[in-house]
Amino acid sequence: MDPNRVALIDDHEIIALALREAVTRIPGLAFAGVAPTVDQLLVRHPDAGLVVLDLRLADGSSPIGNVGRLVEHGAAVIAYTSGESPYLLRLVATTPILGIVRKSDPVSTLVETLQQAAVGRAVMSTEWAAAIDSDPGLDAAALSVQEQQVLRLFATGLKAQSVAAAMKIAVPTVEDYVRRIRSKYARIGRSADTKIDLYKRAIEDGFLPLPDSGS
C-alpha cells in the first residue's frame, strides 16, 4: 500500500474532479483513480493507501462494512459525505477513519485532511467530535458480522427460510440470530420488536441504504 496514492470510491464524476483538484495541491500525493464500489477499487487500484469514501454508494453497501474492508486491506480512510443522515454520521465517526469531510466544505478542508491522513494522522474536526459525543452508546448494539447480514436480509422483508437459503445456514439458526439482534437492541433502548423496527434499525445503523437517498 502506498500512502501517497489517493483513490476515491464514489459514483459521481464531479466529486472525482474535486478530489483530483485537491490532490494536485499537495506535493508528494498522486491521484490513483476512482471506482464506484469497494470491490472495484480493490481490483483497479489495490495499491492506493489513502481512500476517500462516499458513505452513500449506488450498490447499497454498508458504509460501516466498507470502512472495515478498506482498513483490513491496509488503507487509511477519509469519509466524504453530504451529511444527510446524522445518525449514520455518528455511527461512522466511531469507525477507524482518519477524518470526516462534508461535500459542502471548501477544497482547503479536504486538502488539509488529506495532508494529515497521508502521514497517518487523524483530523479530529469539531463535527467529528460532536458526532461521537452526541451518542456515546452508539455502537453498543455490537452486532457480529453474521448478525449484520441476517439483519440486512431479514429487515428487507425476506422470510427466515429465504435468509437461511441465502446465507447457507439452518432456519433455526436464523431465528436465533434474529432473537439475539432484538435482544441487543432492546438492551440499549432501541426497540426492534417488529420487522418494521428492524428495518428502521438497519437504516439508522447503515446496514441498508436510505430509501431514495442521494450521496
Image (cartoon, rainbow, N blue to C red):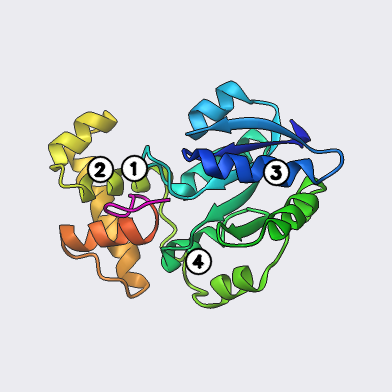
- Residue that carries the numbered disc 3 in the rendered image: 21
- CA gap, disc 3 and disc 1: 37 Å
Q: Where is 176 relative to 105, above or below?
A: above
Q: Is residue 206 magenta?
A: no
Q: What's the distance in space between the residues labelled 3 and 2, CA to CA?
A: 39 Å
Residue 137's spot in the image, x, y percent?
48, 72
Q: Secondary structure at mark 3?
A: helix
Region rendered in magenta? 207-215
Residue 183 lies in quadrant: bottom left
- Tell me which numbered mark, 4 or 3, is placed earlier along the sequence: 3
Residue on which disc 1 sits = 149
**Could you tell me how far apart the alpha carbons at marks 4 and 3 are, in whole angstroms?**
28 Å
In the image, 86 versus 18, the foreground residue is 18
Query: Which kind of residue does numbered mark 1 sit on?
Result: Gln
Q: Are marks 1 and 2 in contact (CB under 8 Å)?
A: yes
Secondary element under disc 1, as helix, strand or loop, is helix
Element class at badge 4? helix
Locate residue 202, reporting x and y percent. Answer: 31, 55
In the rendered image, the residue lying farthest to the top is: 43
Distance between the alpha carbons at the discs numbered 4 and 1: 21 Å
Q: Mark 4 or mark 3, which is nearer to you?
A: 3
Q: Which residue is mark 2?
A: 153
Q: CA distance from mark 1 to mark 2?
A: 6 Å
